[in-house]
Structure formats: C-alpha cells, structure tokens
Amino acid sequence: MKRLGIMVFAFIMTASISFAADMYKTVPANPAMPAVPAVEKKVEAAVPAVKMEMIDINSATEAELKAIPGVGDTYAKKIIAGRPFSNKSQLLSKKILPKPVYDKVKDMIIAKKVKK
C-alpha cells in the first residue's frame, strides 16, 4: 500500500510539473519585444483574421457609412454632404471627421474616383 501511494504521488508531481512547464514556455520573439507565453500565441492562431471589405466614401449609402465603427448618423450625413472626395484624407482637411475617429476608420474606407 505504501508503495502504491508513493507511485501515485510521483505520478501527480510529474504531471503537474510538465503541465506548468508547458504553460510558461515562451515563443521566440523579436529581441525588441517581450516574450509572449505560448498559450496566448495559440489563442491568436486559432482566431482567423476577418478581412473587412473597404467602403467607398464616395458611393456608400448612409446605412453602409453608419455600419463603420465610430461613424454615426451625424458623421454619415456630413460625409454624404461633402462628396465627392479625391482621397480619404479630405475627411480630415474638410473637418468632416475629427482625427481620433479618422484614425479609427482610415483602414476601413477608400475614396474611389468619381466617373464623370
């Protein structure tokens, strides 16, 4: 009985040590960046990157513009009223969007040339 108890104890200790070692294993990283635990890296890899289609600010409907995070009724109406735009940075230069909102949405929008 004593021998069985020692074997069970040894098994539990071995399993817990190997589990703890796996949990804190780090992924080789850029020397400029801190090491990231392997557990976090696996979670990132499990979530597929969702690619959102660019929204053309020159042709999008009000509903499409409001679907952009940070753009509500007021900004959508301002964008429509300020059309056409030769480039998306005109949302800043024409003071249609404030800089924090523009910084949030600039990777989701595009200003295609208007056909005459």
Image (cartoon, rainbow, N blue to C red):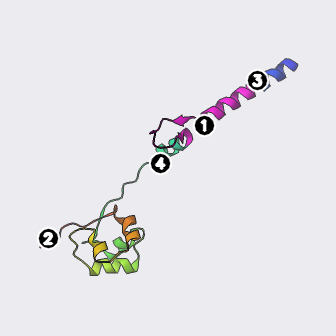
Question: Between 33 and 53, which is closer to the camera in this rendering?
Answer: 33
Question: Between 114 and 90, which is closer to the camera in this rendering?
Answer: 90
Q: Where is residue 79 drawn, in percent x and y? A: 30, 77
Instruction: Identify the residue position indicated by label 4 in the image.
Output: 47
Q: Which residues, given as a range, are shown in magenta? A: 11-39
Dot 2 amino acid type: Lys
Q: Where is residue 87 drawn, in percent x and y? A: 23, 68
- The answer, for residue 40, to whether it is visible in the render is yes
Residue at 66 percent of width and 34 percent of height: 20
Determine the secondary structure under disc 3.
helix
Question: Between 19 and 95, which is closer to the camera in this rendering?
Answer: 95
How far apart marks 3 and 2 lie (CA) works out to 76 Å
The image's mark for residue 10 is 3
Instruction: Identify the residue position indicated by label 1 in the image.
Output: 24
Dot 4 amino acid type: Val
Query: Crowding at label 2, few (<14), some or many (≥20) Cα neighbours within 10 Å?
Result: few
Determine the secondary structure under disc 1.
loop
Instruction: Identify the residue position indicated by label 2 in the image.
Output: 115
Determine the secondary structure under disc 2.
loop
Residue at 52 percent of width and 40 percent of height: 35
Residue at 57 percent of width and 34 percent of height: 25
